[in-house]
Image (cartoon, grey):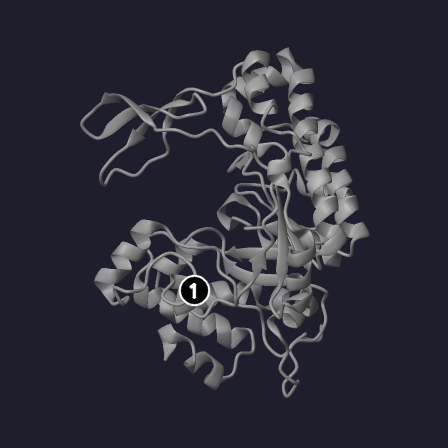
Amino acid sequence: MESILRQGMSELSHRERFIRQMHFQTIDRGVHWEFGYWDQTIEKWHEQGLPREITRGEGRGSVESYFGVDPRWSVPISVYLDPPFSGPVKVLEEKENSRVVEHPDGMIAEEGKGSVVSIPKYIKMPISGREDWKRFKDRLDPSSPARDRDWAAIGEKTRRSQVPVGVDFGSFFGWIRDWVGFEQLALMMYDDPELVEEMVETLTQVKLVQLKACLRECQIDFASGWEDICFRGGPMISPAMFRDIVGPRVKQVCDVLRQHGVDIIWTDCDGDIRPLVPIWLEAGLNCMFPLEVHCGSDPVALRKQYGRQILLRGGLEKYRFSKGREEILAELKRVEKVFEEGGYIPHGDHRIPPDVPYENYRYYIREKLAMMGWSKNEISEVWALA
């Protein structure tokens, strides 16, 4: 297999490089993206040598800028609740390490406070049935004037861009899980499947109307979504149900994107995504992200199984970064051939946790860039590696 890296190739723009890399074409160096960082990671790194002025955010002074992450941007499309539920979060009960709160959408949860970080314990979800759903459906009018954007002006900006431009189409099922709750939704799939299908269809119509308006004017390079509906043991919905209820809607959205030249389409889904990959590919969603390796979503295995019909992002096991340099190098070496083939942007398989030492992460970034064909001068220009 011949590598997509070409020494001596004229320098590409960020946009050209991304498009060529994801289409298995030759590039001057690899695209450098990362997934992100826990707040606690940045706090710990400040104690280990990360300059105090480096924080979360965007632009100069952000962690991404400090580590030389390549730029990209997404157009401001509106596909979520509009208007969103707003108002103060009510504290219903105070405990030693947690508090019970009620959110504006009606969700009641017990959340950690202070230094206690944990997934909330959900007591009451916003949607329990059709009456609750109506409150949400009223905020999902696809043609609401509040969703209007000056797409002509935005489109002009996208055509001039030298960095990759994306559009985020949101979720088909993950948002519904957030509103209904995992256990309640699992029961609803059997007790009232028509309601579940209505919710998925409503979200799909918002996407279709808004995407058509956007894509008529804008030059878009990639489309992204979010689901997070898989655990370590697989998806929370059976593949058969996903294929019947969600698959056709994903295809409608992907068809519109592809009609407008957008053929790099991914969704963010943690856990073991392997049972859903064939359904996504059939529907036209061809890029998998972030590829949590310990759950079985390994970019090496996925490329071997699906060849060039699958595109990949992530897939470097973040827990390896907390080990020694040998483990970090071995993890990079594991995916090197997939990167060299193309259609793959390697980075951590989720946000970097606080057990990864600052110096380990600096070493990982340096070695990843070297693997991706960055020159010594380019590497030395990265703020963190200067």
Give the residue at x 44% y 55%: 36
Residue 148 percent across, percent down from the top left:
64, 42
Query: Which residue is disc 1 drawn over?
Result: 59
Give the residue at x 54% y 28%: 177
User: Looking at the image, how many numbered discs can be counted on the residues?
Assistant: 1
Q: Is residue 340 above or below residue 177?
A: below
Q: Nearer the viewer, residue 381 or 152?
A: 152
The answer to whether residue 158 is seen in the rendering is yes
Q: Quadrant of the N terminus?
A: bottom right
Which SS class for mark 1?
loop
Residue 317 percent across, percent down from the top left:
47, 55
Q: Quadrant of the C terminus?
A: bottom left
Q: Nearer the viewer, residue 92 or 38?
A: 92
| Residue 20 occupies quadrant | bottom right
Residue 170 percent across, percent down from the top left:
60, 41
Q: Is residue 195 left or right of residue 320?
A: right
The answer to whether residue 263 is seen in the rendering is no
Give the residue at x 33% y 57%: 356
Q: Is residue 212 above or below residue 70?
A: above
Residue 237 percent across, percent down from the top left:
61, 28
